[in-house]
Amino acid sequence: MKAYHVVGEAPMYTNTFLLISDSGSAAVIDPAAAAEDYNALLQKENAVLTDIFCTHGHYDHVGSAAALQKQWKARLWCEKADLGGGQFFPLQSADRGYEEGGVIRVGEMEFTVWHTPGHTPGSVCLLCGGYLFTGDTLFAGSIGRTDLPGGSTRQMNDSLRKLAALPIPGEAQVLPGHGDLSTFGEELKHNWYIKSACKQQD
């Protein structure tokens, strides 16, 4: 498996990622960069894009989703709660939604999905190998905003407690939608928001 970090377009500079299996099947997570940026890497690796994963439906995470889906006939994954075609949620439709705890196979790669609402109603996190894609749920040392349409502080705290309780390896790399990368172990130890959410349950 190969993993590429592709930075999205200004002004948001969203972190997006392209994973390519050993057999050449590929998946993009949060396609916010220009379609040609992914296409150049796919051509370089002689790979085929089969899946497009949106951790949530905000405009700065789905910019090239429709174009890539049309070009590659790829499966487009996004929760129904984050669809709608408005300013914040521009995607009109998606091929599929996510099953809680479900495993999605892309070539030899396996993506495990957990619903983590809070930033948006349809936010998810995905684990593939040693990579944890957290979208705008969990950042290095922080979390996503809950004051935008569809956001919920209560749901965010529930989601943070859920993540903390899951059997995610501490060495798993946290690949968030914005900002620096981290590890899950570091976030469990030092992220004030996770620690605070877990204390609220005690």
Image (cartoon, rainbow, N blue to C red):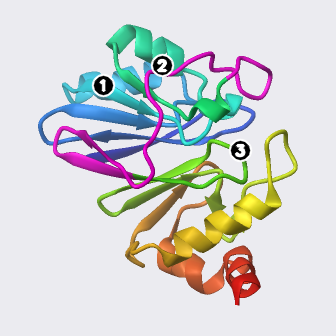
- Image coordinates of residue 109 in percent, x first then y, are 23, 47
Direction from residue 44 to residue 122 in the image, left or right: right
The circle on residue 186 is: none
- How far apart in space, not on screen, are marks 3 and 2 (Cα)? 24 Å
Direction from residue 198 to residue 164 in the image, left or right: left
* Disc 3 and disc 2 in contact, CB within 8 angstroms: no
Q: Quadrant of residue 40?
A: top left
Considering only order in the chain, which callout, 2 or 3, is on the residue closer to the N terminus? 2
In the image, which residues are magenta? 84-112
> Does the magenta run of residues contain 98?
yes
Q: Which residue is mark 1?
A: 49
Circle 1 Cα neighbour tier, 10 Å, few/some/many (<14 / 14–19 / ≥20):
many
Along the viewing direction, whichever of 167 and 181 lies nearer the viewer: 167
Quadrant location of the C terminus in the rendered image: bottom right
Q: Amino acid at mark 2?
A: Ala
Along the viewing direction, whichever of 93 and 191 lies nearer the viewer: 93
Q: Which residue is mark 3?
A: 120
Relative to 46, is 187 above or below? Answer: below
Tell which tag, 3 or 1, sits nearer the viewer.
3
Circle 3 Cα neighbour tier, 10 Å, few/some/many (<14 / 14–19 / ≥20):
many
Q: Which residue is mark 2?
A: 35
Q: Amino acid at mark 3?
A: Thr
Considering only order in the chain, which callout, 1 or 3, is on the residue closer to the N terminus? 1
Q: Amino acid at mark 1?
A: Leu
Q: Residue at x 73, y 80 (%)?
A: 192
